[in-house]
């Protein structure tokens, strides 16, 4: 069985459904099946370029953001990342600094949210210290929410 070329002469036209050159602007391939787009059409010209290895701090930062998606604001049931209360997150040599706000300065569950943030981040491999700071300026507003949170709360764009 022939394998699709990894670096075809005209990558914008190769069909990975039939390994032939089918028109890129056509949704069917030469064998009358659904045309499978080449990765260059989906991901751009550098789809197969070797990527630079990420630094440990960059990896930890992305893991930290994912971990914080599991911290919910108990009053609204939406994670703090999508809710837009996470203002900053920096990672440096095993230490994470988080700046967050609350939807209201009078929020009675602020301390609970901060404890959960610390616990989730300290559970990450390589994280030794977590500092959580409250930031009140600028104040939180609904414009900071992600589209997912807006949809869940029925808030217009």
Image (cartoon, rainbow, N blue to C red):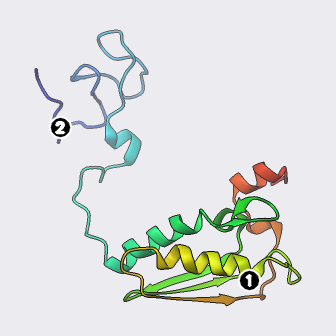
State left or right for residue 29 relative to residue 97.
left
Q: Is residue 103 above or below residue 5?
A: below
Q: Is residue 31 left or right of residue 25?
A: left
Element on which disc 2 rests:
loop
Looking at the image, is mark 2 or mark 1 nearer the viewer? 1
14 relative position to 79: left or right = left
Give the image quarter of residue 127.
bottom left
Q: Looking at the rendered structure, which numbered label has been put on residue 25?
A: none
Q: Around disc 1, counting alpha carbons within 10 Å, would you say few (fewer than 14), some (14 to 19), or many (20 or more)?
A: few
Distance from disc 2 to disc 1, alpha carbons, whole Å, reads 59 Å
Secondary structure found at label 1: helix
Residue 56 found in image quarter: bottom left
The answer to whether residue 31 of the structure is visible from this angle is yes
Q: Which residue is mark 1?
A: 111
Residue 46 image point, x, y percent:
29, 54
Which residue is found at the position 26% from the left and 70% from the top?
53
Q: Residue at x 82, y 53 (%)?
A: 153
Residues at marks 2 and 1 touching, judged by CB atoms closer than 8 Å: no
When the figure is inspected, residue 25 is found, relative to residue 97, above or below; the finding is above
- Give me the residue at 72% from left, 88% from top: 135
Residue sitting at the far top: 32
Marker disc for residue 9: 2
Image quadrant holding the N terminus, namely top left
Could you say where residue 114 lies in the image, as x and y percent from the top left? Answer: 67, 81
Give x and y (percent) for residue 72: 69, 64
Q: Is residue 101 visible?
A: no
Circle 2 crowding by C-alpha within 10 Å: few under 14, some 14–19, many from 20: few
Check the picture and name the quadrant holding the C terminus: bottom right
């Amino acid at each position: 069985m022939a394998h699709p070329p990894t670096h075809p002469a005209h990558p914008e036209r190769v069909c990975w459904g039939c390994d032939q050159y089918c028109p890129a602007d056509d949704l069917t391939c030469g064998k009358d099946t659904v045309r499978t787009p080449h990765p260059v059409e989906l991901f751009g010209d550098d789809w197969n370029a070797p990527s630079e290895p990420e630094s440990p701090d960059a990896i930890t930062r992305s893991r930290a953001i994912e971990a914080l998606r599991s911290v919910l604001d108990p009053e609204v049931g939406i994670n703090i990342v999508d809710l837009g209360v996470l203002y900053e997150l920096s990672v440096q040599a095993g230490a994470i600094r988080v700046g967050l706000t609350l939807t209201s300065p009078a929020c009675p569950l602020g301390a609970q949210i901060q404890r959960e943030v610390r616990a989730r981040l300290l559970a990450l491999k390589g994280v030794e210290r977590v500092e959580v700071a409250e930031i009140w300026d600028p104040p939180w507003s609904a414009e900071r929410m992600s589209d997912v949170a807006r949809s869940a709360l029925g808030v217009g764009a």
